[in-house]
Amino acid sequence: MNKILVIFSVPRTGSNFLCNIINSFREFECFGEVYHNKKVFAPDKRKLELITYLTQVKGVKKISIEKHNDEDLELVKYAHQYPDLFLESMQQTSQKKYLGFKIFQYHLSVENIQKFFIDNRNVIKLVLKRNLLDVYASGRILNENMKKIGGNAAHHLDTSTDKVIFEEKHFSNWLRRTIKYYSMFEYIYHQFPKEYLFIKYEDIHRYKNNQDKALYLINSLNDMGFKIDDKQDLDNLSFLKKQDSRAFVLEKFKNPEAVKEFLFQNDLKNLLNN
């Protein structure tokens, strides 16, 4: 395995959809949030293989596979203490040509992201972006639904008509942190452009069917040095569907005029473009 794909993003940017597409390519094994602070988002069979590699090959003390409230307590703890060895375990136990997974803003410290992934020349960094006002609105809608019904069930709700109240201070703080996170990759990109692939949520979903979306990603990844066969069967793909197709981001707010006023006052009117 000579290349690793790490998807850097924030929640509600379509990263699940992206991972599902990439995982469908026969050359790829693409996990979810493997450095999450509560759970390693990978199939249970693969988690057992990771634990076996770490304990039997690397000599790590026994790691329990028991879960508490669906949380992989010991495996998560090890992944955060030794992100490099955890990465090695994923590489060495994968049966596919390429490995991929995603990292969100608070999964690892900035220092560990820099040391083990940004400075790793074998890692291709796919930076997934989306209109930040859209991301914010989608995140607030999800959080409100999670408060009502709790847990993962909220992720599967149809939220295409839900709206939230825009709060200036909350949005300002969230926007500052999010821009800072993305800026880290944009700054380093100018030094190592061949290691960075920037993709927009909107670019993926401008295609009407999953097959065309998959071909767009195949071409993008091949441009970065991966070798993915664009002739493989893409006719029976059934990815997660894009639920919310509202044409204008302001439709997601209960107080759209307050949103517009804030954006114009702070020279952020570009966020009105979906």
Image (cartoon, rainbow, N blue to C red):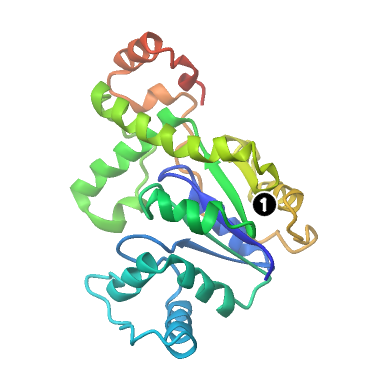
Residue type at mark 1: give it. Answer: Ala
**Which of the 4 image quarters holds residue 61?**
bottom left
Confirm whether residue 99 shows in the render. Answer: yes
State whether residue 83 is above or below residue 249. below
Q: Which image quarter is the N terminus in?
A: bottom right
State whether residue 96 is above or below residue 195. below
Relative depth, front residue between 85 and 152 = 85
Q: Secondary structure at mark 1?
A: helix
Picture coordinates of residue 234, whole percent (x, y): 70, 59
For label 1, count other residues whose C-alpha is less than 10 Å away and answer few (under 14), some (14-19) or many (20+): many
State whether residue 36 is above or below residue 97. above
Relative depth, front residue between 161 and 68 = 68
Instruction: Give the residue displayed 78% in from the left and 61% down from the top.
Output: 229
Is 130 on the left or on the right of 167, as rendered? right
Instruction: Give the residue displayed 67% in from the left and 52% down from the top.
Output: 214
Picture coordinates of residue 161, whole percent (x, y): 35, 34
Picture coordinates of residue 236, whole percent (x, y): 66, 61
Q: Which residue is label 1 attached to?
A: 214
**Which of the 4 image quarters holds residue 140?**
top left
Confirm whether residue 239 shows in the render. Answer: no
Relative depth, front residue between 240 and 197 = 197
